[in-house]
């Protein structure tokens, strides 16, 4: 089910009403789990396969991770068995990803030509279960944290004793894994960030104002900014792009940068707003990434839940920066390469991740990372603005690897950008300027936060309320044609 | 301010803005154009579906889309609806018509893009008329596409600059340039759609407009359209030839679509030819 669909507009009030109809945690958790499964199973993909066919995989993933966590936390489990359980759980999670997401790529890579023609293409045709990258990473987070916690337990999740406690334990795990606001496209929540929040919720306690502001901004970014920009960025398609003049190509490149941010940050904000409505807090996923002065800073501001997951569960276990310079660079490359592949089973994504890894390594080599960190909280000088502009352009060019399925199309784009002056086409430029402006203003608003600190709090409050209402109004009267979220494909 | 009070204020203010926007609609400049294909088409669809049903409906591509309904007001045709859809062809318009319970007595079909392949643009349009927002815009007029703030700004700028052409001219002309091979069977598909309309008692006519570029190889050539009309047993109006006979020299915004002045002149010629045909 899409957040920006009419079915969701009916679904949400029903779930909200049922959730707060009774205060018992068992009821509330039950309602949320059931609602999440309905949310996940609703509708069908572009090929007409019903999403409900994907439920068994979600069930299997949740059940196995739940059992693994339970056994890992149990005082009766020996150290040797704990190691085996952890290994099995990791193999299952990564195996499911490999099977459903990367089987096609691996088959193409490993199978001889004849086998590829007969079997490989069939394997490559396996549809990608929606949200698998997100809920698998949450599963890994659960078992790894249960492993790290040993027998002392996690905050909000301790070893159960007796049937009732086991049922309660598993119910919490199921809610953590399936909670509908973040099930399909994140933010990727770590077990320790969520489990301790599970408990009875009262309607009077929810942060309704905060939820409304997040929802207004999230829906605005998705339905007004991203959906309207998508209408023009669809021209970023080979060979049509070869007909476009240089200025339009450059504008489209920037437009795609703004679109992808608005689309994904919009989704994350809606997820946060919805979670607030049910009394839960989800982590921030975007912190004005286009204000970054270095690529290192960009990765601290963009898809924060993924980069922090990769840092915690991949970069640190690999040794991080504690095993010498060479290993640090290798780890950086590896993490960014795998982070790129996480987005999709295509070499373009791997190339995109590797290019970012290369950028991070270069910054580290020249000491830009630490310099950038020192300046992060400083003011806005001309140099800082120049750095932001350069980083934004680097990031934007690298998005081309996201947009085009073939690296050769990226080369064609760059070739046209250099060699095709042409007469600018004003209509797409109008759309790009009009619908990119809110993203720029949103970033400027954040960049001038320190300047507004002296304002009376009542002013700030009124401006926020007025802005949220205006954004909501624009969602109603100026939305673009509704479309899927870009990150659904990952 | 308490959080719950903030929420009430946000929702209340938002609903008030929508209500005020709806009330102000008669005072607002209405957009006939929009910044993208979908919204421009939505304006035309809503004008046809939600306003009083006109007797004559034009069906075609963005080439027809330039013939704004107001150009016909003082002609024999009077009130018309224009389903000249940007980025689409006559097939989408005909399918939309056939979904309506209120079919018009006269449908004029553009001959230029009969062979246009079905696209996601067409799927979006067919889905749009079943969207609850489309239905709601019948009553909450602030939801209508012609009072969309960005479309109003676009329309004002476009009219001010004198371009006045409908949306996405540039995208349209690009898509014309990228050769599209028609999917075989399109003639049969179109004939079936036309037959369905005729079975409902609708009079059909095929027409050809002036286009800036040399006629497209498969579906724009005069003889080709005339032959199709003969095969299907429907009348044919060659507006392009009539414009040339009258000494009118059309001008184009992008080499393909007519400027507002030319579109107005062409609309008058088309209305006169249609009236003459009706008298016969």
Image: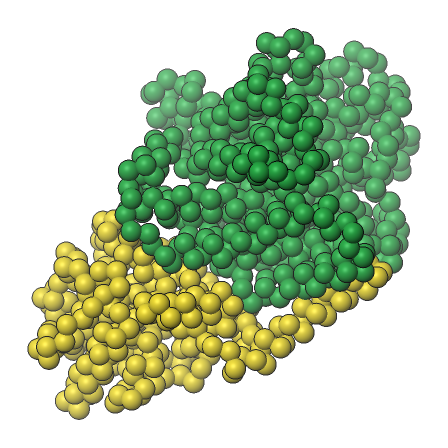
Q: In this rendering, would A421 be left or right of A443?
A: left
Q: Is residue B277 visible?
A: yes
Give coordinates of residue B36: x percent, y percent: 41, 60
Residue furthest to the right in view is: A161
Residue furthest to the front in view is: A382
Question: Quarter-wise, where is residue B104 in the image?
Answer: bottom left
Question: Quarter-wise, where is residue B230 in the image?
Answer: bottom left
Residue at (63% x, 76% y) in the render: B19
Q: Relative to residue B80, is residue A240 depicted above or below?
A: above
Q: Quadrant of the C terminus of chain A?
A: top right
Q: Which shade of the palette goes to chain B? A: yellow
Q: Is residue A54 visible?
A: no
Residue in the foreground of this view, choosing between A452 and A415: A452
Q: Relative to residue A173, is residue B22 depicted above or below?
A: below
Residue in the foreground of this view, choosing between A29 and B54: B54
Give coordinates of residue B229: x percent, y percent: 15, 71
Residue at (33% x, 52% y) in the render: A424
The green-tinted chain is A
Residue at (54% x, 20% y) in the render: A362
Residue at (72% x, 60% y) in the render: A463
Q: In this rendering, would B129 be left or right of B215?
A: right
């Amino acid at each position: 089910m899409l957040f920006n669909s009419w079915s969701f507009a009916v679904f949400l009030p029903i779930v909200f009403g049922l959730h707060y109809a009774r205060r018992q945690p068992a009821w509330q958790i039950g309602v949320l789990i059931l609602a999440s499964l309905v949310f996940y199973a609703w509708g069908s993909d572009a090929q007409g396969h019903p999403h409900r066919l994907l439920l068994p995989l979600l069930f299997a993933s949740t059940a196995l991770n739940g059992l693994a966590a339970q056994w890992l936390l149990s005082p009766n489990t020996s150290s040797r068995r704990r190691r085996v359980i952890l290994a099995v759980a990791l193999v299952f999670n990564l195996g499911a990803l490999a099977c459903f997401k990367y089987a096609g790529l691996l088959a193409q890579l490993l199978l001889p030509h004849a086998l590829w023609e007969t079997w490989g293409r069939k394997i490559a045709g396996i549809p990608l279960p929606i949200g698998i990258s997100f809920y698998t990473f949450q599963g890994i987070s659960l078992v790894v944290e249960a492993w790290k916690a040993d027998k002392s337990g996690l905050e909000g999740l301790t070893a159960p004793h007796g049937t009732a406690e086991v049922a309660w334990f598993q119910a919490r795990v199921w809610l953590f894994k399936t909670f509908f606001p973040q099930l399909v496209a994140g933010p990727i929540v770590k077990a320790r960030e969520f489990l301790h929040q599970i408990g009875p919720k009262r309607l009077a306690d929810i942060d309704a104002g905060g939820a409304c502001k997040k929802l207004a901004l999230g829906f605005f970014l998705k339905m007004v900014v991203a959906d309207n920009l998508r209408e023009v960025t669809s021209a970023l398609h080979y060979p049509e792009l070869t007909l476009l003049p240089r200025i339009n190509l450059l504008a489209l490149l920037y437009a795609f940068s703004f679109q992808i941010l608005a689309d994904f940050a919009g989704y994350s904000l809606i997820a946060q707003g919805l979670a607030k409505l049910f009394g839960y807090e989800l982590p921030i996923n975007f912190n004005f990434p286009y204000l970054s002065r270095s690529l290192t800073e960009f990765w601290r501001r963009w898809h924060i839940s993924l980069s922090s997951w990769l840092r915690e569960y991949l970069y640190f276990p690999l040794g991080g920066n504690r095993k010498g310079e060479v290993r640090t660079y290798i780890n950086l490359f590896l993490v960014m390469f795998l982070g790129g592949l996480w987005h999709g089973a295509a070499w373009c994504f791997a190339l995109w991740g590797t290019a970012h890894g290369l950028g991070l390594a270069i910054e580290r080599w020249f000491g830009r990372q630490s310099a950038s960190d020192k300046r992060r909280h400083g003011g806005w000088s001309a140099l800082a603005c120049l750095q932001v502009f350069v980083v934004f352009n680097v990031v934007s060019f690298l998005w081309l690897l996201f947009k085009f399925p073939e690296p050769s199309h990226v080369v064609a784009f760059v070739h046209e950008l250099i060699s095709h002056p042409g007469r600018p086409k004003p209509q797409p430029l109008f759309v790009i300027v009009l619908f990119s402006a809110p993203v720029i203003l949103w970033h400027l608003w954040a960049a001038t936060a320190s300047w507004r600190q002296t304002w009376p709090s009542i002013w700030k409050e009124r401006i926020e309320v007025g802005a949220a209402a205006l954004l909501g109004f624009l969602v109603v009267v100026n939305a673009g044609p509704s479309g899927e979220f870009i990150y659904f494909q990952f | 301010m308490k959080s719950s009070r903030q929420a009430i204020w946000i929702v209340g203010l938002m609903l008030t803005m929508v209500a005020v926007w709806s009330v102000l609609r008669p005072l607002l400049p209405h957009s006939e154009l929009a910044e993208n294909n979908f919204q421009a088409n939505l304006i035309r669809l809503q004008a046809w579906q939600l306003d009083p049903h006109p007797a004559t409906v034009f069906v075609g591509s963005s080439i027809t889309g330039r013939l704004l309904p107001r150009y016909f007001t003082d002609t024999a045709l009077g009130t018309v609806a224009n389903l000249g859809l940007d980025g689409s062809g006559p097939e989408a318009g005909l399918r939309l018509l056939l979904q309506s319970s209120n079919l018009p007595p006269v449908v004029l079909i553009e001959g230029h893009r009969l062979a246009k392949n079905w696209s996601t643009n067409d799927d979006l349009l067919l889905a749009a008329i079943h969207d609850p927002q489309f239905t709601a815009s019948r009553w909450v007029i602030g939801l209508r596409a012609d009072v969309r703030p960005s479309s109003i700004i676009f329309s004002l700028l476009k009219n001010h600059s004198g371009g006045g052409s409908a949306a996405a001219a540039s995208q349209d002309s690009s898509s014309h340039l990228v050769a599209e091979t028609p999917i075989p069977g399109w003639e049969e598909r179109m004939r079936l759609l036309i037959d369905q309309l005729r079975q409902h008692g609708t009079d059909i006519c095929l027409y050809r407009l002036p286009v800036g570029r040399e006629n497209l190889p498969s579906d724009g050539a005069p003889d080709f359209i005339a032959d199709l009309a003969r095969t299907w047993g429907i009348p044919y109006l060659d507006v392009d030839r009539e414009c040339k006979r009258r000494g009118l020299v059309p001008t184009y915004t992008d080499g393909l679509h007519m400027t507002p002045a030319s579109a107005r002149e062409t609309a008058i010629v088309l209305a006169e030819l249609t009236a003459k045909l009706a008298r016969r």
